[in-house]
Image (spheres, rainbow, N blue to C red):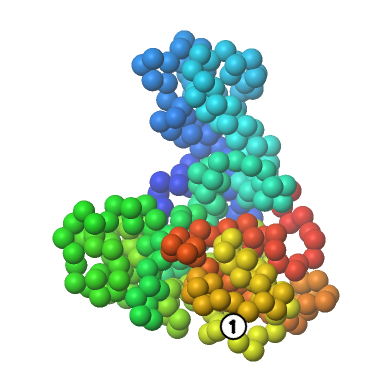
Amino acid sequence: MGRSRDFWLSCGHHLLDRDAVGRLLVTDEFLKAYLARPELVPTAEACAAERILHSELLRDPRQPVAAARIAALVDADARENWQMLITWRDHLVRHDSLEAAYLGIVRRNIHFPQLLVGQLVQVILRNALDGFDDVFILRAAEMFFRPQKVILQGASIIAVDEDMETEVGKHPPSPLLALLGLPAATDVNLLSEETAENYWERSDRFDMALDLSPGGRGMSALGDVITRWLAHLLAIDVVVEPVGDLRNLSWNWYVGLTVEATHIGDAIWRGDSLADDRCAQLVGLLRLAFRDPTDAIERVRGEPVHLLLAMTADGALRMKPQNLLTGLPILEAEVLN
């Protein structure tokens, strides 16, 4: 039996241990990786106190750090960066697993920089999707932790990584990309059956575009990611499938997967008519059903939950995966401590 193929090496999943049920355990090696970030590696101008702090944490990344040590740092930016790191580190090690640490952030609405939270989402997804060989699912999962830019061309809805989109326009145009309405950049590859094999060597570049058009693989793959995300973090079993349009739907419960999607869902709930420009922001609609109806609160048992995905007026798509954990009509249960 062949070994599963690796992906997203940069998230540091290989530095982590796992408990008996597969949740991620913080290791010293994982904590030390934060110390290699450019914001924390002391510069040539760094004070002696910062150099000593960095050196000591490299030896023992879990050692207590008193507030006075941070206050003693000369550079104000360094003080801010180190305070955030220690607060973040303390939050991670306070929990039994990284999954529990993430749920703590979501449920208690703890504010941390989106960069750190996004990296945490990535490594949790890397764990949840370990062994998957469907690259459409892996590419759809990138939307959970990397903002996208949506390009519309006819009936095609194409998602490109936001960072990749900012680099476009620097290369000669490709006729295929022009046909699809994608930015002209030779490094952008549309994920398809023909290009799927390329994903494995490019997974840390986040430079493959995903087709989210109705009836295509992209939205179905996103539904599969949502299914796995909920199974891994909340231990609930659901089926998630794309829906063609909003008409004639029973609107008993909905979850917006982006800020804009929540606004659209709210308007539908109130019975407001949606302007054409607001409708045009809707990228996709999914229907979620509980395999075990008793997982849901009583008043919606047997009824579907609708998940909306929408972009901003200028095409930015920033998913909020935490909404799936806090917005579903599920019975209250602390699955992870």
Assign the N terminus to one quadrant of the image.
bottom left
Name the residue rendered at 64%, 42% in the picture.
Answer: 111
Q: Where is residue 26, by image quadrant?
A: top right
Q: Percent from the top left, x then y, of residue 156?
A: 37, 77
Is residue 306 visible in the rendered structure shown here? yes
Does residue 29 appear left or right of residue 298 in this picture?
A: left
Q: Disc 1 designates what residue?
A: 246
Residue at the outermost right position: 298
Q: Where is residue 278, by image quadrant?
A: bottom right
Q: Percent from the top left, x then y, of residue 167?
A: 29, 52
Residue at the outermost bottom position: 248
Name the residue rendered at 73%, 56% in the picture.
Answer: 335
Q: Percent from the top left, x then y, of residue 218?
A: 44, 73
Is residue 228 visible in the rendered structure shown here? no
Instruction: Classify mark 1: residues with Cα within 10 Å, few (<14), some (14-19) or many (20+).
Output: some
Q: Percent from the top left, x then y, of residue 233?
A: 65, 58
Residue 144 vs 154, above or below: the answer is above
Residue 173 vs 27, above or below: the answer is below
Name the residue rendered at 39%, 15% in the picture.
Answer: 45
Q: Amino acid at mark 1?
A: Leu
Does residue 309 appear left or right of residue 4 in this picture?
A: right
